[in-house]
Amino acid sequence: MPRRFKLLKNKLVTKPVLQLYDPKLPLHVFCDPSQVAIGAVLKQPDSSETIPGYRIHREKAGQGRSRVTTATEDRYWSIIARRNRGATASQLSRDLYAATGTRVSRVTVSKRLHGAGFFARRLAVCVPLTSTNRRVRLARCREHRDWSTDQWPTVLFTDESR
């Protein structure tokens, strides 16, 4: 085992060693597709005209878990989410289970809706204004109605509702 480690270490520190990309030199792309994987290498000559390799991508076809939902079920979520904007991903998951018997997680629902252009939002909670607050705010607005643009930069606006 130590002999193999030394051999590997020696290969890593002797030429050809990976080098930084130089935009002035030509760039060659070599692809290696096969039945089980797709490989690609970028190559660029160095000062000694040798071409060290850069491995950039290797992906096995058909990796990952298969989809639990169909395209029809994804469209169903889009329709329901559009009709009921306040529905949560958990509620939509339960609705799909009740309609089709397909169990999916809340995260799956969120990802499918995100792919369809729906994003999570939180409702803004506003502080209710009393009649006294409204009267004071209206008086302040009327007081500053005729201010010039030179006077407004001295004002600091804050959100004290939180």
Image (tube, rainbow, N blue to C red):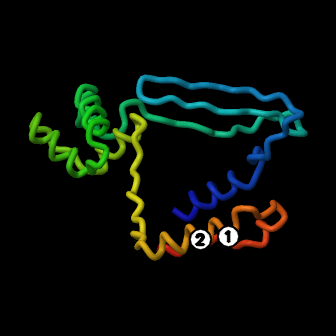
Tag 2's secondary structure? helix
**In this view of the protein, which residue sits in the foreground, 157 or 21?**
157
Q: Which mark is residue 90?
A: none
**In this view of the protein, which residue sits in the foreground, 5 or 69?**
69
Q: Seen in the image, is 94 located left or right of residue 150? A: left
Few, some or many residues within 10 Å of mark 1 (<14, 14–19, 20+)? few
Q: Seen in the image, is 150 located left or right of residue 60? A: right
Q: Is residue 66 above or below residue 150?
A: above
Q: Is residue 129 above or below residue 77?
A: below
**In this view of the protein, which residue sits in the foreground, 125 or 145?**
145
Find residue 19 and report its horizontal and vertical position in percent. Answer: 78, 46
Q: Is residue 76 above or below residue 10?
A: above
Few, some or many residues within 10 Å of mark 2 (<14, 14–19, 20+)? few
Find residue 47 and report its horizontal and vertical position in percent. Answer: 90, 39
Residue matched to label 1: 143
Q: Mark 2 belongs to which amino acid?
A: Ala
Give me the residue at 68% from left, 51% from top: 11
Q: Seen in the image, is 90 located left or right of residue 148? A: left
Give me the residue at 89% from left, 34% from top: 24
Give me the residue at 87% from left, 32% from top: 25
Residue matched to label 2: 139
Q: Choose top left, top right, bottom left or bottom right for residue 139.
A: bottom right
Q: Mark 1 belongs to which amino acid?
A: Glu
